[in-house]
Amino acid sequence: MPEGPSILILKELVQPFCGKKILEVTGNTKQSKERLLNCTVRSFKSWGKQFLICFDDFTVRIHLLLFGSYLINETKAAQPRLSLHFENGLINFYACSVKFLEDPLDSIYDWEADILSQHWNPLAAKVKLLKTPSLLVCDALLTQDIFAGSGNIIKNEVLFRERLHPLNKIEDLNVVQLESLIDATRSYAFDFLKWKKNFELKKHWQAHNRTICPRCNIAFKRAYLGKFKRRTFYCSNCQILYNEQ
DNA sequence: CCGGTTGTTCAGCG
DNA sequence: GCGCTGAACAACCG
């Protein structure tokens, strides 16, 4: 379910509850959810994969992790982790992390790191990458401090588009390649968003979960690479490794 | 029915 | 304190 673009869709869908008071709170979260009763939602925000429900003096952070899901004005058999009831409907969150944030969001989040934000700052991303020259590109695209909202699908698709082998180090890319990688990540995230809204995301996957490279017609390599050891699909022919040591 | 996964955190260890 | 590893969490699909 949840890479950054999916959280943006969630944020859009809950807008009818912005400014509304919470009339009932249920769910199996261990957090003190009673606190939310009679509170008015001031805004919904997001940072990368994190969904933020903002109140006057605190924020609820929802992270869907790998298996989390939500339903709006619907229920299913599973017990919700957190359920918020409003006069005009309800939001159910399942299998997610729920956390109260007490500090101002500006002190917690670097909005410029969110690949989907209007505050996204590609130059800041470049500076961060240049400070971690030995970082593998496959790991860089999963590092939330640099590319908040990017996940394993975005990683595989961006590396394919950029014709970069996942085991390249940042220091082995020239500045043009580095800037192109940064721009391509944001650009693919918005393609992801558009396709996801149209329920056609998978149809557009070129590398992720694919077996044959659409450019070369040879078999994709499939391996668990980098410090994150996430599933990586790549073409050993057209995704180039610039420094094989 | 089992294996696998669009993710993160934490304990334990060297 | 750091980096690394493994475990834990947990739901749905094929």
Image (tube, coloured by chain):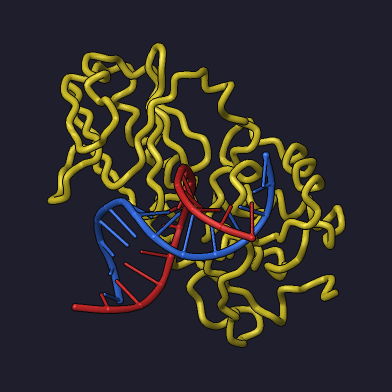
Chain colours: A yellow, B red, C blue
Viewer-closest of A9 and A168: A168
- In the image, residue A202 sits, relative to residue A223, either above or below, namely above
Image quarter of residue A169 = bottom right
Residue at figure coordinates x 58%, y 21% from the top left: A107
Seen as rendered, the residue at the extreme bottom is A218
Seen as rendered, the residue at the extreme left is A77
Image-based side of A159 in relation to A33, left or right: right
**Residue A208, how many percent across, how many down?**
52, 69
Image quarter of residue A245 = bottom right
Residue at figure coordinates x 71%, y 82% from the top left: A237
**Residue A115, how many percent across, how many down?**
60, 42
Q: Is residue A194 visible?
A: no
Residue at figure coordinates x 65%, y 78% from the top left: A235
**Residue A148, how many percent across, how many down?**
58, 43
- In the image, residue A128 sits, relative to residue A176, either above or below, namely above
Image-based side of A81 in relation to A151, left or right: left
- In the image, residue A60 sits, relative to residue A47, either above or below, namely above
Mark count: 0
Q: Is residue A223 visible?
A: yes
Viewer-closest of A156 and A107: A107
Image-based side of A183 in relation to A27, left or right: right
Residue at figure coordinates x 59%, y 45% from the top left: A144
